[in-house]
Image (spheres, grey):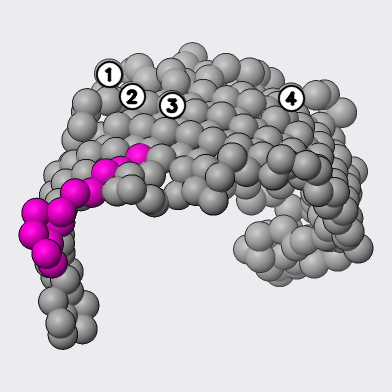
Amino acid sequence: PRFGLKYNLDGGQSLSFGYGKHSEMMPRPYYFLQTRLDDGTYIMTNTETKLLKSHQLVLGYDKLFNENTRFKTEVYYQSLFDIPVSEALTEFSILNTGDDFGGLFPDSLVNTGSGINYGVEFTMEKFLSKGYYFLATVSLFESKYKGYSETVRNTAFNGNYVFNILGGYEFKTGKQSLITIDVKTVYAGGKRYVPIDIDKSIQENSTEYDWSKAYEDKFDDYFRFDLRIGFKINGKRINQEWALDLQNVTNNKNIYSQSYNPRSQNISYDYQTGFFPMFLYRIQF
């Protein structure tokens, strides 16, 4: 169930409140995971795992300065329960699925885990008018979980903050043509990770993780600046657009993952895409 309330104030202001109790399945591969028994047969131990559940609360404030500009903020709180966790790997929680570390698929999951998310978001927005637009957002948050061991840990996604700024300007070069310039900047807290146990990795000659320190530390903060320059022609029958899209203009090295390198017997890092220019041509009938 869920419900929401909105109260309109003077001066283009409003307050809102929402609550919902949500349920969802865990990723499907976990349900069909097969475990091999000593006699060579296989069984599926996760088929009876219950749905993940959560209580979610949101309180919002919205201010419309004019028909094109507004400010809004939201404070939210999420309490998650019946979260599948593993007795064999007590630091595991289904809440960290998709963090790209380890690719773990434990069997015999039980719904005794929990989690909590809370934070505040601010948004300042101007819709396209008079040839320009912009959007600025700030998100400050905490994200924690408990595995089978009941130890409170950061989730894999607890970067703590995200800042976004994007905007654009367009100006006419003729009756039916215009030039567009768009920029986008993202600055975010680094990705949480499970540290590599270098001594054990050397011994096993493969990447071995120290799960006792799961998600305590973060990689360096993420930064990316994109620039797009375009030219449009609006015809009677067709519209055409040419654009140069420059992604990660500063060629910032944002860490994606880490692994053990057997040759150097050290840790190697994989990085997200660096500076990447693209040319685009689009025709609309």
Name the amino acid type tagged 1.
Ser
Q: Is residue 174 magenta?
A: yes
Mark 4 secondary-structure assignment = strand
How crowded pointer 4 is (Cα within 10 Å; few <14, some 14-19, many 20+) is rated as some
The answer, for residue 166, to whether it is visible in the render is yes
Q: Position of residue 233 (x, y in %)?
A: 12, 67
Q: Disc 3 marks which residue?
A: 187
Q: Which residue is drawn at 16% across and 71% down?
A: 234
C-beta proximity under 8 Å, tags 4 and 2: no
Q: How would you rate the neighbour count of disc 3 (Cα within 10 Å): few for under 14, some for 14-19, many for 20 or more?
A: some
The Cα atoms of the two marked residues, 2 and 1, are separated by 9 Å
Q: Residue at left 56%, top 45%?
A: 66
Q: What residue type is labelled 2?
A: Ser
- Marked residue nearer the N-terminal end (4 or 2): 4
Residue placed under numbered mark 1 in the picture: 264
User: In terms of depth relative to the viewer, which is nearer, 177 or 103?
Assistant: 177
Spatial CA distance of label 3 from label 1 is: 32 Å
SS under mark 1: loop
Q: Which of marks 3 and 4 is nearer the N terminus?
A: 4
Q: Tell me the SS state at disc 3.
A: strand
Q: Is the magenta stretch mostly helix, strand or loop?
A: strand
Tell me how far mark 3 sits from mark 2, CA to CA: 24 Å
Q: Distance between the residues labelled 4 and 2?
A: 25 Å
The range drawn in magenta is 167-178
Q: Which residue lies furthest to the front in this view?
A: 11
In the visual, does 146 lie left or right of 70? right
* Residue under pointer 4: 153
Type of amino acid at the residue the image marks with label 3: Tyr
Question: Any mark on residue 274, and which?
Answer: none
Q: Are marks 1 and 4 in contact (CB under 8 Å)?
A: no
